[in-house]
Amino acid sequence: MDEFLDDKEFTRFKDVIYQASGITFTDANRIILSSRLREILRASKIDSLNAYYDLITKDKEEMKLLLDSVTTNLTSFFRNIAQFNTLEHYVFPELIKKKRAAGETKIKIWSAGCSTGEEPYSIAMLARDKLPPSFTLEILASDLSLKCLMTAKEGYYAGSKISGIPDSYLTRFFTKSQDGYLITDEIKNLIKFDYHNLNYDSGNRGLDVVFCRNVIIYFDSAAQESVIEKFYNSMNNQSFLFIGHSESLFGMNTKFEFLKTEWSCIYQKKG
């Protein structure tokens, strides 16, 4: 047993985190929660878990900081390239055809759980390159981590972070800056970054594409279904949902339909 985070304290903290965010901690990842709590108490000079628990349950901003610290933020540009091939070769052509038939030219995309911004910037670069000039693009990008959102908004990435970006995009959509690269305003201006907790309705509506990859894997089945239903309600008919390659909606009570393309498997709201 962890002497720092005993069974009673573990239950208290995992329950309050679940209620606030839908993120589930089990015995298998208990050590992660224990480690993060140790770091927080040391940094903030709080002398007990009990005092910290009282603080997060009374102060919403402190709860946000806790959720920030326990989230995992592993990402990269054009991560899982097969899904970006699906976006380019299947989803964009389908949306262009649908929008033109309806006399529309705007495409709305949400990157939910955008971490430090590599995913929405990848989407934006691909869209700028592949969509007709007459089309307008609106990308919403959200995350639970305020630190990650600050990095994403800045749009600066060290040289070690740019692997996966095509050379033509690196030349066209970045400027070299010191030891790294800065996203150009042409791409930055396509994206609105904002804090959002997936436990709650975002208020987004009329979305054509939602990316939520490697996020619901941290939720239990009830929280997963709740999040997926919120996505469904936020999306247009004939829209598309991308989740992580290790995630699945199989067995969920959902109206999304499984869609196998030549490049990868995604989901569609047919309506």
Image: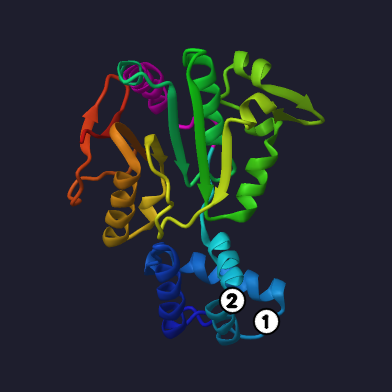
State the extent of the magenta-drawn residues as a range. Answer: 76-96
Q: Is residue 42 above or below residue 206?
A: below
Chief SS of the magenta region: helix
Looking at the rendered structure, which numbered label has been put on residue 146?
none
Mark 1 residue element:
loop
Location of residue 37 in the rendering, given as x and y in whole percent from the top left corner: 57, 72
Residue occupying the point 46% across, 76% down: 13
Q: Is residue 72 visible?
A: yes
Looking at the rendered structure, which numbered label has been put on residue 46?
1
Circles 1 and 2, Cβ within 8 Å, touching? The answer is no
Q: Is residue 256 above or below residue 52?
A: above
Of residues 202 and 38, the one drawn nearer to the viewer in this rendering = 202
Residue occupying the point 53% across, 15% down: 129
Quadrant of the drawing holding the C terminus: top left
Amino acid marked by disc 2: Asp
The question of residue 31 being in magenta is answered with: no
Between the residue at mark 1 and the residue at mark 2, the CA separation in whole angstroms equals: 15 Å
Residue 29 quadrant: bottom left
Amino acid marked by disc 1: Ile
Mark 2 residue element:
loop
Q: Is residue 162 visible?
A: no
Q: Is residue 13 above or below residue 155?
A: below
Quadrant of the drawing holding the N terminus: bottom left
Mark 2, other Cα within 10 Å: few <14 / some 14–19 / many ≥20 = few
Residue 116 quadrant: top right
Residue occupying the point 55% across, 46% down: 115
Disc with the residue nearer the chain's start (1 vs 2): 1
Location of residue 2 in the rendering, given as x and y in whole percent from the top left corner: 48, 78
Q: Is residue 204 left or right of residue 173?
A: left
Per the image, the residue denoted by label 2 is 59
Residue occupying the point 35% across, 21% down: 99
